[in-house]
Amino acid sequence: MSRGRALVTGGAGFLGSHLCDALLGDGWHVVVVDNLLTGRRSNLAHLANEPRFELIEKDICQPFDAGKIDYVFHFASPASPDDYHRHGIETLQVGSLGTFNALENARRYGAKYFVSSTSECYGDPLEHPQKETYWGNVNPIGPRSVYDEAKRFTEAVTMAYRRYHKVDTRIVRIFNTYGPRMQINDGRVVPNFMKQALLGEDLTVYGDGKQTRSFCYVSDEVDGFIRLSKSDEHLPVNIGNPNEFTILECAQLVVKVTGSKSQIRYEPLPQDDPKQRRPDITKARQLLGWEPKVNLESGLRLTLDYFRKAVEERTSAAR
Ligand code: UDP
């Protein structure tokens, strides 16, 4: 039995495409709207013959009508620091104009609405680990503000549509996630280290490598999305892995998993780089019965084949 039609903005991206797979598996007809700024058709190539799937190439910053829909999953945005630095204005636009347009689709058809927010709402956090009740420590004019403030605004518009227009909304705050379909050149730490280790290059650790992140494998992350999408919770929920690693530990683990002989090279720390990050997932545990199952070492092993192929494709294209 079909659950109905789900719109996924940003469905050609890393997380969006995995979400599409999960929704199709759950019985949805899925319509992706994506302008392919940072998303890729290849992430959805395996769905080419799927009758319950459509891809519409369109910029959601312009008003659009996706037709009768039952659920909106708003995932469109550049998300890696390199991408949102390169596309700062587009990041602000999709978080603001794009969010209005996604919400208007939900409002028009009385559809449920689910939006991807981020741990970046907490900025360089002074509370650790981060609970959903923490308001954050964000520099509103620094280089990361194009993303952080766009996402904080996204949350504000979402809550306003709930209060003023009675749209049935949900907000997930996503912490660092990794897995197949990440772009090898998106500049994030896992693809950078994997690529460098597989090519035998130095691993570039920014700063002293003592800053921390907590990495969630993509299947765990998407399982959290699906559970939250079925709940009635409308306040933000953290979905991320609570196991915290220093970036140096992450580098050492990548070297171990790849069996590489790469060395560490230290490079300057980017401005406003959060010093620590770890989700408090008590709420997700209690509310959704959710917690991640895949630890970082196993997840890196699961991702190894994908990165090997991506590195090979890149090197053969460069020849
Ligand atoms: N990082 C690093 N080397 C790299 C890429 C990133 O040391 O080649 C660090 C970065 O400074 C940050 C952490 O790894 O402290 C995570 O960076 P990423 O860009 O993956 O995402 P963020 O959590 O900062 O949004």
Image (tube, rainbow, N blue to C red):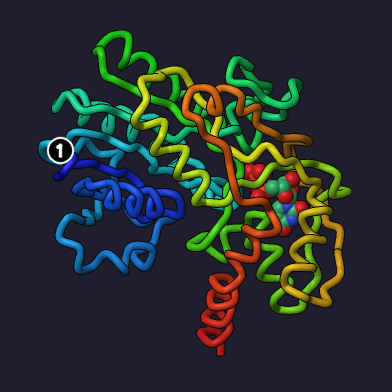
Picture layout, residue 279 above or below residue 283: below
284 left or right, relative to 136? left
Where is residue 71, by image quadrant? top left
Residue at 61% across, 24% down: 282
7 left or right, relative to 123? left
Q: Can see residue 147?
A: no
Q: Can see residue 243?
A: yes
Q: Which of 294 and 60 is in front in this view?
A: 294
222 left or right, relative to 191? left
Q: Position of residue 10 (x, y in %)?
A: 36, 47
Check the picture and name the quadrant holding the C terminus.
bottom right
Picture layout, residue 249 above or below residue 194: above
Check the picture and name the quadrant holding the N terminus.
top left
Q: Does the residue labelled 1 lie within 8 Å of ligand 1?
A: no
Total label count? 1
Residue at 23% across, 56% down: 55
Q: Secondary structure under badge 1?
A: loop
Q: Say which amino acid is labelled 1.
A: Asp
Q: Position of residue 274 (x, y in %)?
A: 73, 36
Picture layout, residue 135 above or below residue 308: above
Query: Circle 1 is placed at which residue position?
Result: 65
Residue at 51% across, 84% down: 317
Residue at 23% across, 47% down: 27
Picture layout, residue 141 above or below residue 87: above
Where is residue 118, by image quadrant? top right
Where is residue 197, by image quadrant? bottom right
Q: Where is residue 295 in the image (x, y as percent from the top left)?
A: 67, 51
Q: Where is residue 268 in the image (x, y as percent from the top left)?
A: 82, 51
